[in-house]
Structures are given as structure tokens and as C-alpha cells.
Image: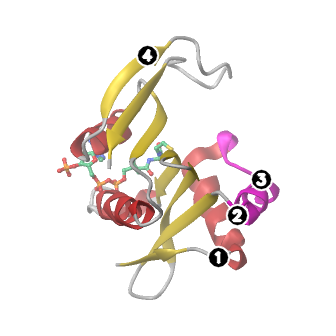
Amino acid sequence: MNFCLLKSSLTEYIAKIEAECFGTEAWTKQMLEESLSSSNTFFWGAFDDENTLVAYAAVLAADEICDLIKIAVMPKLRRKGIADALLKFVIDDIKKKCVKKMFLEVNAANTSAINLYAKNGFTVLFTRHNYYTGAQYGCKDALTMTAEI
Ligand SMILES: CC(C)(COP(=O)(O)OP(=O)(O)OC[C@H]1O[C@@H](n2cnc3c(N)ncnc32)[C@H](O)[C@@H]1OP(=O)(O)O)[C@@H](O)C(=O)NCCC(=O)NCCS
């Protein structure tokens, strides 16, 4: 697996992962394009041996603080350590921009993601009740997590 910062020319491939991983909650191509062209938002990807984008992560950084906005791995490639390796790569890279602290919001029922974050040093700051409003959310609570990086 190879990891690197992504360029906006890959929007189409990121959108494919979004659709597979987030269904009705997926960001549209236009939302991705806006984020990719923003000067404080960064996308990293994981590429397999055939150079296909199979996972990505997005971070919004301002001064010494950043937010992990998304991390997603294609369903057929999960539980192989890809998200763990990608998150470590992202943290190493964003630290080069003098970022010292990372925050994120995660659905309180998303055990896979919560375990991934906990494994990488994130702790729960607080629970935000009824954070998610859509009918599709079984659990509407969000955890705000943070880590010194
Ligand atoms: C969350 C997600 C990114 C994990 O990706 P992954 O590549 O399968 O994760 P990894 O194989 O690197 O696993 C790393 C750690 O995450 C946790 N984890 C991952 N999948 C898990 C599962 N199904 N159940 C419990 N813990 C899990 C474990 O702690 C694991 O470490 P371990 O293997 O030593 O137990 C992936 O499930 C995904 O894309 N989910 C849909 C998108 C999403 O919800 N993203 C997060 C919010 S933006």
C-alpha cells in the first residue's frame, strides 16, 4: 500500500469511495471539489499495488489545530490495517505543518471508527446528544474525540 497527499484531479475516485462507504450521507463530487480546492483542507489516499485509490482521509487544519473530517476504506479491503496505516501517515504529515492537536466527531455507534481512533491515542472529550438529525441515523449521538499529535 502506498500513501500520499491527493490532488483535485482524483475527485472522481474519492467520490467512488464516498458513495461506497457513506451511501446517502456521501459528499457529492461538488462538495469534494470545494474541499479539495480549499487552502486549509488536505486529502490523503492509500493506493493498492495496481495504483487504485482504495481509501482516503481528509483533514481541515488551521494554526496548531486540525479536524479529521473523514476516513474511509473500501468495504472489501477492511480489517487489513489500511485505515490504521493511513491515519498514522496523515498524522505524521500534518505534524510537518506545525499542527499539534487533532479533533474529530464520530457517531457513538460507529465502533470500528471509535476503536481505530482509540488505538491511535484519541480520547473522548464529551458526548454531543442528538448531534445527527437524519432519519437514517440509528444513533444520533456524536463523540468528540481528541489527541495530541
Ligand atoms: C472505520 C474504518 C475506516 C476502519 O478501516 P479499516 O481499514 O478496516 O481499519 P483497520 O483494519 O486499519 O483497523 C484498525 C483498528 O480499527 C478498529 N476496527 C476496525 N474495524 C473494526 C471492526 N469492524 N470492529 C471493531 N473494531 C474495528 C480496531 O481497533 C483495529 O485495530 P485491530 O485490527 O488491532 O483490532 C472503516 O471501517 C470504514 O471505512 N468505515 C466506513 C466509513 C467510516 O465510518 N469512517 C469513519 C467516520 S468518517
Amino acid type of the residue tagged 4 in the rendering: Thr
Magenta span covers which residues?
Answer: 24-39
Residue 48: x percent and y percent?
41, 80
Which is in the foreground here, disc 2 or disc 3? 2
Residue 88: x percent and y percent?
31, 60
Q: In the current view of this chain or complex, which residue is farthest to the bottom?
A: 50
Task: State yes or no: residue 6 in magenta.
Answer: no
Is the CB of the residue bearing disc 1 within 8 angstroms of ligand 1? no
Give the label on residue 7, or none: 1
Instruction: Say whether disc 1 or disc 2 marks the residue closer to the N-terminus.
Output: 1
Amino acid type of the residue tagged 1 in the rendering: Lys
Q: Which residue is mark 4?
A: 127
Q: Which residue is mark 2?
A: 36
Amino acid type of the residue tagged 3 in the rendering: Met
Amino acid type of the residue tagged 2 in the rendering: Leu
Instruction: Say whether disc 2 or disc 3 marks the residue closer to the N-terminus.
Output: 3
Q: Determine contact: label 2, label 4, CB under 8 Å.
A: no
Task: State yes or no: residue 32 in magenta.
Answer: yes
- Which residue is located at x 48 percent, y 63 percent? 97
Which is in the foreground here, disc 1 or disc 3? 1
Q: Residues within 10 Å of mark 3 (few under 14, many from 20)?
A: few
Q: Residues within 10 Å of mark 1 (few under 14, many from 20)?
A: few
* Secondary structure predominantly adopted by residues drawn in magenta: helix
Give the label on residue 31, or none: 3
Q: Determine contact: label 4, label 1, CB under 8 Å.
A: no
Instruction: Say whether disc 3 or disc 4 marks the residue closer to the N-terminus.
Output: 3
Residue 143: x percent and y percent?
43, 24
* Residue 10 position by quadrant: bottom right
